[in-house]
Image (tube, grey):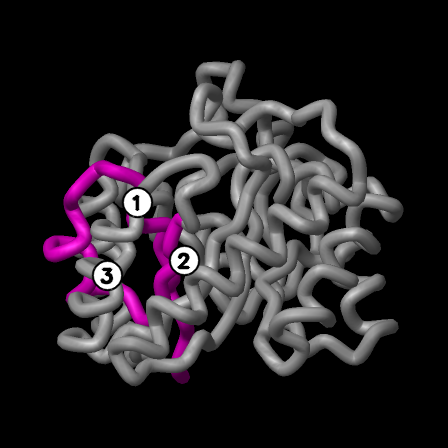
Amino acid sequence: MKIDINCDVGEGINNEDLLMPFISSCNIACTAHAGSVEIIDKVICLAKENNVKIGAHPSFPDKENFGRKIMDISNDELQESIKWQINMLKERAKIQNIELQHIKLHGALYNLVVTNQKIAEVVVQSILKVSPTTFLYVPFNSKIAEVAQNQNIKIKYEAFADRNYNDDLTLVSRNLPNAVIVDKRKVFDHVFRMLSFGELKTINGKFIKINADTFCVHGDTKNAIELLKYMFKSLQKKGIIIA
């Protein structure tokens, strides 16, 4: 069995050289919530060296809040921002002769399109205009997944290795102390359950069906390197290849 492990990068943590050997795809911040052109170029180079697929990681244009708060901007402004972010990442990738494999939204925007169909449609229209053949990483059973499929955008279902879930498959708010999983064994068990049984254990102890093609560890999780190393080695012991 092969699985994809992805990681959010280019966000100023400067740990990409340590992350890359243990992942197979990465989501590069497009300077809206974090990062810079110089960081993007460096991360693309590292990804090439480690045979890691690259994706754009667009967000609300809000560095002040790291893209983790919903912004009060018009749909037209949001669409133009998303288009600009994706195009910019594509241009930087082209310079290094590498193609964009996917798009994954960041933070508040990612969470918003799980349930908000109108914003999901804004996002999908942005993608159709600038990168219609690129994969979109989406949560299972979400509005964005439904809208993307209806518009013939290729999707990959994503689940989070280092985040706890509510019973409705939304992520536990980062304002709560149990939002992020930092115990490496719990992270592995979380992922292995989803892989083996197609279900996850919610924060309330319920078992909920989920599909996942790719699993994310956040690059800014405090012990992201430890989590990825342990998961990489533990999956290999089970005969599962990260690729």
Q: CA distance from mark 3 to mark 1?
A: 9 Å
Up-down relation of residue 165 to residue 237 (above or below): above
* Quarter-of-image position of residue 48: bottom left
Q: Which amino acid lies under the numbered mark 2 shown in the image of this protein?
A: Asn
Q: Position of residue 216 (x, y in %)?
A: 42, 54
Instruction: Classify 10 Å Cα crowding around label 3: few (below 14), some (14-19), many (20 and above).
Output: some
Few, some or many C-alpha atoms within 10 Å of disc 2 (few <14, some 14-19, many ≥20)?
many
Q: Is 218 one of the magenta-colored residues?
A: no
Give the residue pinned by disc 2.
27
Give the spatial CA distance, label 2 vs label 3: 13 Å
Q: Position of residue 101 (x, y in %)?
A: 46, 76
**Looking at the rendering, in which quadrant would you find the C terminus?**
bottom left
Q: CA distance from mark 1 to mark 2?
A: 14 Å
Left or right: residue 165 compared with residue 218:
right
- Judging by the rendered image, the residue that carries numbered circle 3 is 41
Residue 15 is covered by the magenta coloring: yes
Q: Which residues are magenta?
A: 1-29
Point out which mark residue 214 bears: none
Q: Is residue 177 left or right of residue 227?
A: right
Of marks 1 and 2, the one in the foreground:
1
Residue at x-position 53% and y-position 50%: 58
Residue 189 seen in the current view: no
Q: Dot 1: few (<14), some (14–19), or many (≥20) neighbours within 10 Å? A: some
- The quadrant holding residue 239 is bottom left
The residue under label 1 is 36
The amino acid type, in three-letter code, at marker 1 is Ser
Q: Residue at x 64, y 65 (%)?
A: 211
Relative depth, front residue between 86 and 23: 86
Label whose residue precedes the other's in the sequence (2 or 3): 2
**Looking at the image, do the residues carrying marks 1 and 2 touch, with CB atoms under 8 Å apart?**
no
- Between disc 2 and disc 3, the foreground one is 3
